[in-house]
Amino acid sequence: MWCRFSTIARYKDKMENSRDRRGAIKVGIESKKASHNGIGIHYLDSNTDSSLVPLLICPGLSETAEEYLDLIEYVSPRRCVVLSFRGRGQSDTPEQGYGHQDHLADMECVVQSAQLNRFHLYSYSRGVSYALGYLEKNQSKVVSLIAQDYPPEHRKMPDGWAQEYIAQYLVIRPEAVWGIQRESDFLAFDFKTDIRMLLLRGTLEGRLLEDKGIDAYRRICPKVAVRNFKSSGHDIRNTEKDLLFKTISDFISQS
């Protein structure tokens, strides 16, 4: 079983190396907080070339904004904004409020705070369900969507998931883990859109996007494109990072 602790430590080191002597993040990346009903949502903003359509990143269930510094640098000078959802990273951890709509509220307050009018949207794993929920309500704002290795649905966590996660993985705060299990519901997306959409999926054991999931995406967006990664399961960034970043950059550069 692959463990994310070494990856998290690596990104913490990278984050520290990205700071100057005053503790500010270098290369124009700013650390900011948006607020929704008193809950602070942390995000990073490269705030660079305004002539290019910016990229908003929705991390996976256990990820933080800092884990996407490599991608921010790769797509530079394009502006890139990435948030840490509630209970993750430097965002606040409420005692409750971990349903699908609550995570959408995190996205919405960051979009408003960062003054993003139109943007590309890249999402990974469970973050895909939040990105799809945002797209359904805000199609005029989203220029394109990249969904990485997750079907078009929001999954309800099974009984016992929280205990297992805390025992084996605990990389986000326990309050968030219990809140996600307690408040998550199943939701299948069935809206229609004609924006450009790209699906990224692994081909090895552990992938979460199967053929029936791709068929479901095609009912949402008939012209959706699919890119398979032959040396990856679910975590493409850990196994084929260079190809993944190039694929993302090439896709968003087309519009």
Image: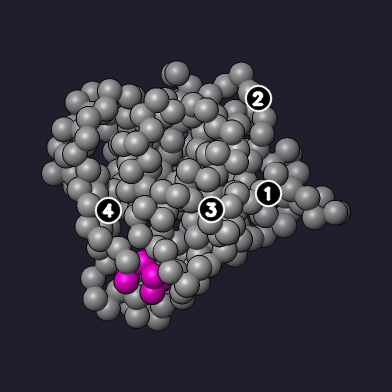
The circle on residue 31 is 1
**Residue drawn where x is 34% and y is 36% of the image:** 137
SS assignment at label 3: strand
**Callout 2 amino acid:** Asp
SS assignment at label 2: loop
Q: Residue 217's spot in the image, x, y percent?
A: 21, 36
Counting residues from the start of the chain, the first of labels 4 and 1 encountered is 1
The circle on residue 154 is 4
How many numbered marks appear?
A: 4
**Residue drawn where x is 49% and y is 56% of the image:** 85
Counting residues from the start of the chain, the first of labels 3 and 1 encountered is 1
Q: Are marks 3 and 4 in contact (CB under 8 Å)?
A: no
**Callout 1 amino acid:** Ser
**Callout 3 amino acid:** His
SS assignment at label 4: strand
Q: Residue 38's spot in the image, x, y percent?
A: 57, 59
Q: Which residue is mark 2?
A: 49
